[in-house]
Image (cartoon, rainbow, N blue to C red):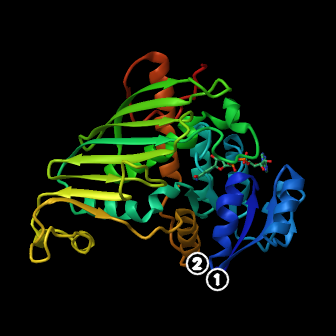
């Protein structure tokens, strides 16, 4: 029985500093005992900044530390597999940043190894944990907007807006893709979380502006098994951070953002419905303002400003609670693998100029397009 989750962290770059370090500090039954980074100076700096007791000299020292029961993997994507398999063999639970890996075969091996060693493997799809996303999920579960026939999800963030500490993203062998893997992957997962499995996709991937020749303007048109059709688009050149997902159903619509609102959004979540007041769930009932106090809801948009809670804290809290309670994770290796399949399918679609059916054969090789 684990009472406290004692973390070892592999990789103390940007996402460690922005997310894991601060989030774990806030969790009462969790702490960071040791860190390792190939850039030892950076690890030493981080240990001072966040008062972390130990800086391991190498990966094996960190992973074999008997006091540690969980590992966070926050390193370049092509290193995830080796670290995860070592950690699983040492009996450590694993929180692995997205994408799970850079190819399907590695992802399958990671999942298998975690299953064999009976350790949890959670993937860092933090966007599922925004309060507004949780509300959307609940509304879809009660079929509130009817049959969702169409969706659009946009995610745009300039390449230098994010304070990365290394350049690995621009080495496609190491990253497995740039915009696809950094931004679009979150929406690929979010759409699957909300609308179910993908049936087939067709993609266009372009390089327009980033100084490195990588994908910075990408589109995925997808048919879902549920019958929904929609587009995910992402870019890394627009100086304004752009964010928004719209779901259109036969009985209503839902618009939401995850990270930021722009002047065209008033709020992070808006739901359109023509249902009567007695047909709408409390979360919406409590948020509508009638045109006069004696009037009931007459249909239209209901806007919500859900509590802004850091999703990185929520995902790591969930990871820790599930370890302590002996439960499996909420976002597992298969979720990581399914998102990676869409990335690889997009590369096939770009190369062969065709629709690609899902799921992919597990032996499908990744072929990253050249720009
Ligand atoms: N969930 C999210 O929203 C989110 C956001 C950003 C990054 N990420 C993911 O986090 C991971 C790291 O991204 P980042 O932005 O922090 O990158 P980064 O370049 O800022 O940091 C990477 C760190 O890993 C270290 N490193 C490289 N190889 C290593 C190895 N073999 N062993 C130990 N340390 C090693 C580097 O020295 C560096 O400190 C990636 O998988 C990325 O996709 C997730």
Q: CA distance from mark 1 to mark 2?
A: 6 Å
Would you place residue 336 above or below residue 271 in this image?
Answer: above
Res 139 visible = yes
Picture disc at residue 324: 2
Secondary element under disc 2, as helix, strand or loop, is: helix
Q: x, y (%) of residue 113?
A: 63, 53
- State which quadrant residue 69 falls in: bottom right
Residue 83's place in the image compared with 56, above or below, is: above
**x then y, percent, for residue 271:** 25, 58
Q: Residue at x 71, y 75 (%)?
A: 31
Dot 1 and dot 2 residues touching (CB under 8 Å): yes
Picture coordinates of residue 323, whole percent (x, y): 58, 73
Q: Secondary structure at mark 1?
A: loop
Q: Nearer the viewer, residue 222 or 292?
A: 292
Can residue 92 be seen here? The reply is no
Name the residue furthest front.
Answer: 292
Residue drawn where x is 78% and y is 61% of the image: 63
In the image, farthest residue toward the top: 352
Q: Nearer the viewer, residue 237 or 179?
A: 237
- Residue 104 or 321: which is nearer the viewer? 321
Residue at image position (82%, 55%) is 59
- For the point 66% across and 43% down, the residue is 77
The label number, if any, that marks residue 83 in the structure image? none
Q: Which sits in the foreground, 223 or 112? A: 223
Residue beneath label 1, please? 3
Tell me: 315 left or right of 169: left
Pick whichever of labels 1 and 2 is earlier in the sequence. Answer: 1
- From the viewer's perspective, tell me whether residue 108 is left or right of residue 50: left
């Amino acid at each position: 029985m684990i009472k406290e989750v004692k973390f070892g962290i592999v990789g103390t770059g940007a996402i460690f500093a922005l997310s894991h370090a601060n989030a774990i500090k806030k969790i009462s039954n969790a702490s960071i005992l040791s860190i390792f980074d190939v850039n030892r100076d950076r690890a030493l700096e981080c240990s001072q900044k966040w008062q972390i007791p130990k800086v391991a000299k190498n990966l094996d020292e960190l992973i074999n530390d008997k006091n540690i029961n969980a590992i966070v993997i926050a390193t370049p994507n092509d290193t995830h597999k080796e670290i995860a398999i070592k950690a699983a063999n040492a009996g450590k639970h694993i929180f692995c940043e997205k994408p799970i890996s850079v190819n399907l075969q590695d992802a399958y091996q990671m999942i298998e190894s975690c299953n064999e060693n009976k350790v949890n493997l959670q993937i860092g799809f933090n966007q599922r944990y925004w309060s507004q996303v949780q509300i959307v999920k609940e509304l879809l579960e009660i079929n509130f907007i009817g049959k969702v026939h169409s969706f659009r999800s946009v995610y745009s963030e300039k390449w230098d807006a994010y304070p990365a500490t290394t350049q690995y993203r621009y080495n496609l062998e190491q990253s497995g893709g740039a915009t696809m893997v950094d931004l679009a992957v979150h929406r690929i997962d979010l759409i699957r979380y909300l609308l179910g499995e993908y049936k087939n996709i067709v993609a266009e991937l372009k390089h327009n502006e980033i100084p490195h020749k990588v994908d910075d303007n990408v589109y995925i048109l997808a048919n879902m098994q549920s019958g929904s059709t929609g587009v995910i688009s992402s870019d890394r050149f627009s100086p304004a951070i752009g964010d928004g997902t719209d779901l259109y159903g036969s009985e209503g619509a839902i618009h939401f953002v995850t990270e930021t609102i722009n002047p065209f959004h008033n709020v992070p979540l808006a739901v359109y419905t023509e249902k009567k007041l007695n047909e709408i769930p409390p979360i919406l009932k409590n948020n509508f303002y009638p045109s006069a106090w004696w009037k009931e809801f007459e249909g239209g948009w209901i806007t919500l400003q859900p509590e802004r809670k850091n999703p990185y804290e929520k995902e790591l809290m969930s990871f820790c609670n599930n370890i302590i309670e002996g439960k499996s994770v909420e976002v597992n290796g298969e979720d990581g693998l399914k998102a990676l399949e869409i990335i690889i399918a997009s590369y096939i679609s770009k190369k062969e100029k065709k629709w690609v059916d899902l799921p992919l054969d597990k032996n499908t090789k990744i072929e990253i397009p050249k720009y």
